[in-house]
Amino acid sequence: MDLKELPPHLIALGGSYLGLEFGQMFCRFGCEVSVVEMSDQILPREDPEVSESLLDALETEGMRFHFASKATQVAKVSDGLELAIEKKDGNTETLRGTHLLMSIGQLPNSDDLGLDKAGIATDKNGFIRHNGKLETNVPGIWVLGDVKGGPAFTHVSYDDYLVIFDNLVNGKNRTIDNRMVPYALYRDGRDVIPAMRRFWLRGFVGGALQVLSYGIAIWAMTAAPIAIVATLRETSVLFGAAIAVIVLKEPLRAARIVAACLIVCGLVMIRVQ
């Protein structure tokens, strides 16, 4: 974030959210961008259809990807850096770049909080241990936010506060166990839509589309997120209003469907049934 000039060749270590978001940004700035990812696809947590569609779009823009690759060594050279990577098949390769973006995770700043003096337990990575009510091992001490581990989002930290407040002040018995956490990947451009349409039949089970007034559609089905989004797109129901109400019979798929719909439609309302 302190760069004063554009990196001629940025190597992003990690093909998930930060690596792709910053990677596309610098690619749009005119930089050469290479992404190194340990798994076999970008966005390892997502459905293959989503990852493949986004990969096609980013490669079209000029980004390059190295999958099933683990970084083993970084060395500084006169004109930048060299990154040694090892692939799953045992082959090795050396990438040359000018700047390295570490986008493979985070560690908590908990080592200077004096947790040991209070007897508060942490895991091997420094995250504070807690139960579903966010209680630590020390009675009367709770934890919330990124320092507890898990998804590092502002809305998660705020919900942590609500859980603790309700339990302490309102006498409730709330927990974060099985909490559904919405998230999104920020990228620019609609060039991903044609690639998505290639997968719209994959995973299709069936359903019925009912068009209501004000450009709102209700789609009741069990299908892959891309199937739902692309099908609604093909009907042109979302062309103007870009609003969909999806009745879900599989609530755990809600977060993925919301993320997919946001890429294509812009605004989605979800009702779980």
Image (tube, rainbow, N blue to C red):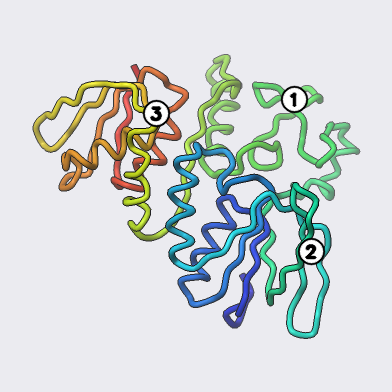
The type of residue carrying mark 1 is: Gly
Q: Quote the CA–CA distance across marks 3 and 1.
A: 49 Å
Q: Which mark is residue 203?
A: 3
Q: Residues within 10 Å of mark 2 (few under 14, many from 20)?
A: some
Q: Quote the CA–CA distance across marks 3 and 2.
A: 38 Å
Frontmost of labels 3 and 1 is: 3
Looking at the rendered structure, the secondary structure element under dot 3 is: loop
Which residue corresponds to the image point at 81% horizontal and 25% vertical from the top-left? 138
Q: Which mark is residue 140?
A: 1
Image height check: is 156 above or below 178? below
Q: Earlier in the sequence, mark 1 or mark 2?
A: 2
Task: Please state the horizontal and vertical placement of residue 75, each as a whole percent of the image.
Answer: 83, 71
The type of residue carrying mark 2 is: Ala
Looking at the rendered structure, the secondary structure element under dot 1 is: loop
Task: Please state the horizontal and vertical placement of residue 123, each as a whole percent of the image.
Answer: 82, 34
Image height check: is 74 above or below 259? below
Looking at the rendered structure, the secondary structure element under dot 2 is: strand
Direction from residue 218 to residue 270 in the image, left or right: right
In this view of the protein, which residue sits in the foreground, 36 or 169? 36
The type of residue carrying mark 3 is: Gly
Q: Which mark is residue 84?
A: 2
